[in-house]
Each structure stands twice: as C-alpha cells, then as structure tokens.
Image (cartoon, rainbow, N blue to C red):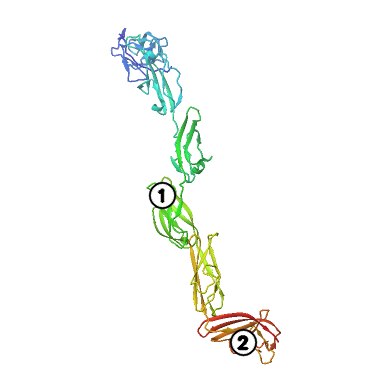
Amino acid sequence: MKKLFTILLLTILGATAAHAQCDDIEVYLIDPDSPSNVYTAPFQFDFCTTTLPFVLRGNKDGGVFNGLGVVSDSIFNPLTGGGSYQIIYSAPGCTDYFVEIKLIAPSAIPELNELPNFICENAEAFEIQGNVDADATVKINDVFTNIFNPLTLGPGLHRIEYIYIDPDVTNGCVAIDKDSISVVALPDMEIIGLKKVYCITDPPEQWTLHTPTGTSTLIAPGLSLNGIFDPRQAGEGTHIITHNYRNFSGICETTLIEEIEILPELAVEVTSAGSACYTETDTLVYSGQELPDTAVLAWSIKEEDGFLVYQEGNKAVVEWASPGDKEVGLAISNISCDGNYTYEVTKVGVEVVIEAQDQVVNSNTPVSIPVKATSNHLAAQFTYAWSPSTGLSCDACDNPVALIDETTTYTVTVTDENGCSATDEITLTLSSGNVFIPNIFTPNADGRNDELHVLGQGIASLTFTIYDRWGEQVFETTDKSIGWDGTHRGRALNTGLYFYTADIVFEDGSTVVKKGNVSLIR
C-alpha cells in the first residue's frame, strides 16, 4: 500500500511544559509531504497515524529531541501505532521542554485491488475498487471518479488515490492507498496514399504506414509485398482494407478497417454516322456508356489521317485524307474516372485505273480498254459504268472493246457495295491518215518489192526501226521516202522473220505507234 499523508485535526490537546527557564522556547511539527502544514506546540489536535512521519523543529540553537518515536533526532515516526507520546526538547541554557503528541490509528487500512501497470489506450473502461469501498472514494489525477477510461484519459501516467475516511472517528481519520497506471498510446493507423475511390485504369501506387514500435500487417486485394497497390489487380467493386497492429509488449492490439471502391473502366464506343467512304465528310458520334452531364469530350485524329472540321460534345465532323483503319482519340474528363481513349474507324476507298494509254486509232479499228479496280475492303464487289457508251462493246464491264469513228473520251465509274466510287478516263483520237506496212518483202533485185517502206497518207514524220530476232537493230530511218533493202552494214541478211516499230506523226498532229513483224524472203 502506498502511503499518503493527510492531516485531520481531531480533539484539541493541551501540551505540557513542565518547567522552563526559557520562556520563549517553541517547538514545531512539520508535515514533510506538505511543508506548509506547520503545527506549533502545545498541539491542539490528535494526529492520524497515516500522516506520519513528522519533522520536529525547535527555535533554539543546539536544541535536540528525545523520546519514544523520535528518529535521527528530528523525525517523529513511532512504529507502535496510536497513543500518547512524550517528546523532550533540550536546548543549551534552557530547562527541558516537554511536548505531548497524541496519535490515533484508522480502524481499517485501505488497499486497492490489483491494478495493471500498463493498459492500452483502446482498452475498455473499468471500475477501480478496493477493500473498503463503502467508506472510500477514488481520485484519478485529482478528479473524484472510480471509472478508469483509457480512451478518455489518454496516453501517459495516471495517478490513482484510494481514500478511506474512518467512520468510527468523530472527526475522521483519513488513510490513502496510491497507485498509478500508464496508458500506452495507439499509433497513427492511417494508410498513407489510400484513397476512398479508384478507377480501375489508375496506375499502381505506393501505400505506406507510420512506423510505430510494433508490427503492422496490411491486408488488401491487389497489394504487393512491397506495398504497391494495383487497382486492376484488385478488380472493380467494393473492397475491405485491413490494417492490424500489435506493439512489441503485446499490451496494445488494434485493427483499422477501410472500405474502398474501384470503378469499372468506361465502355467507350464511337460510331461513324457518315458514309463508309473516306471521300465523304464523316460524322463521329460517341455511342458508349452513358456519361453525366458534366462530362467534357475532346476529339482528336492524326494529322496524316485527316482533320477535324468541327467538334462539340459527343460529335465530331471529319474530313479523311485516305482510306484504311483510322485511330480516333477521345479524351473524357470531369467525370469520376477521367481517361484518354482510342477507337478505330475503318474508311473504305476505291481506286480505278484504265490499263491502256490515250492513243490515236484508225476508224473502225478495235481497241481493248481493260480496267483494274481495287479497294481496301478485300471482299469488295464492283460495278462498272462507262460514259459515253457509243462505240463500246459493253457499258457495264471491266474490259470493253471500242470502235470509234470520231475522237472520243471514255470515262469509267467503278462503285463498290458501300457506294464508294472512283473514276478514270481514256481518250481515243481518230487518226487523220492511213498507215500500212507490208508483212513480206523480197529484196532480190528483181525490181519488185525489193524494199520495205511505211506506206500511208497524211504522214508528217516517222521513226521506222527494224530488229532481228535477237533484238539487234539492223535498220532505222526518219525519212519516209527511205525503205529497208534487207542489208545491214552493207551485208545482205538472211531470209527470216524481223520485227519493227514505227512511231508516226500525222499532219493533224495525231500520232500512232505501229508494231509488228515482216518476213524477209530472197
């Protein structure tokens, strides 16, 4: 039991001074725990034994105290309990001065029930009790209460006083048992970096804990061993995060429960509301998951793919530069989960090429006009439309034959099943002259058919070239009056098949190219 000293004044006693030669002698009794409590003999109180010990003092130099209960000449602390004690104060030149001190003992000694030395801040409140509860009061930190609530009191050392007032003593005799309890503080359980709401597209982030003296365990879906939290690993929905803590002494244990929500990825869709053809102005429309009215949409396309004519809210107008797969960028902000999204739009393009050159042709000379059509849509089905159709063997095919009697420009339009189309054209110029090159000549010096000439009317100029079967040039002239006599470098060539080309310009400026072969016979 811890001993406190409380002084209660009981009955007034007379102190006896048997004889004195020093009329001004004085003796004092001092409470060492409360030095301001000073009592002057003769003492008018009975003192409670619970207030012991006292310090004895006199006003004469060299004075000493003797008597039962006097310790070390100046301490009054009898071990025999209550009763009347005669104390003698002797001072040089003075007759001994006698002092009577009366002690009374309480009828019970208060004792607190066993208390913990340490308790955690989150422990439940409990009632402080002892052996004389009916006649006792409790003070905690000088406040009268017998309920010890760690959470309210807070961390630190807290004083406990169990105060007994003896009901059998008229003026009371107070006894006190003292103890203390140390409340151990809980750490800051905050999870640094934790947010209440995540988007599943958010990047992984570091979670950290404060570093109290103890061990902490963090349990969460999507959390790595080094504290990296990945929303995508955790998955969308509501998740419970648990932080368990225990200090090294085992006195304090606590758990923090947090709830977080991971929002799903926005379902973004973009629809091309315009034609499938890249050549036509296109309207892009956001057609995905419903957005709140606060959402802000910003569209973008690559510079090489085209340009934005206009955009507002969930629509954008685009001019495409080429066919193919186009990446549309869409930034959506001012919503729970802002994000940048890409969406692919495929635009179709048709290309057409007439695989024949503009040329000069003779009247009623058939000319084939083959057409090659292609599309980035591999399964495309094409239709063909020729204009004008005059002189054509067919006006809806990919390889008509033309017979003209006047210069004509033919245009073909090729269209696929999406309505995407392309055109090409060819001009057939009616020749103003006639050209004839024999296919046999006999350079045998008989005066008939000994030279090969380009024959015809309206010829302004020409280049006439002949090759042997190995491709070696054996003759060339730009003079329409000069023909080939079947020799090369002054040597008569052998009978056989030879090949020619004739580039001819007519007097009206039209041109024609003739190619063929001729048999040399001797």
> Residue 41: where, in percent of width, then height?
31, 12
Q: Residue furthest left?
A: 23
The residue that disc 1 covers is 333
For this rendering, which residue is in front, 522 or 499?
522
Quadrant the N terminus occupies: top left
- Describe the element under mark 1 as helix, strand or loop: strand
For this rendering, which residue is in front, 76 or 516?
516
> Which residue is drawn at the image coordinates 39% and 53% (left, top)?
313
Number of residues whose C-alpha sits closer than 10 Å to that of mark 1, classed few (under 14), some (14–19) or many (20 or more): some
**Residue 40 position by quadrant:** top left
| Vertical side of 100 occupied by 421: above or below | below
Q: Identity of the amino acid at label 1?
A: Ser
Number of residues whose C-alpha sits closer than 10 Å to that of mark 2, classed few (under 14), some (14–19) or many (20 or more): some
On residue 453, the disc is: 2
**Residue 518 position by quadrant:** bottom right
> Residue 490: where, in percent of width, then height?
68, 89
> Residue 69: where, in percent of width, then height?
40, 11
| Vertical side of 112 occupied by 184: above or below | below
Q: Is residue 108 visible?
A: yes
Q: Spatial distance from mark 1 to mark 2, Cα to Cα?
A: 82 Å
* Left or right placement of residue 353 versus residue 485 in this view: left
Q: Identity of the amino acid at label 2?
A: His
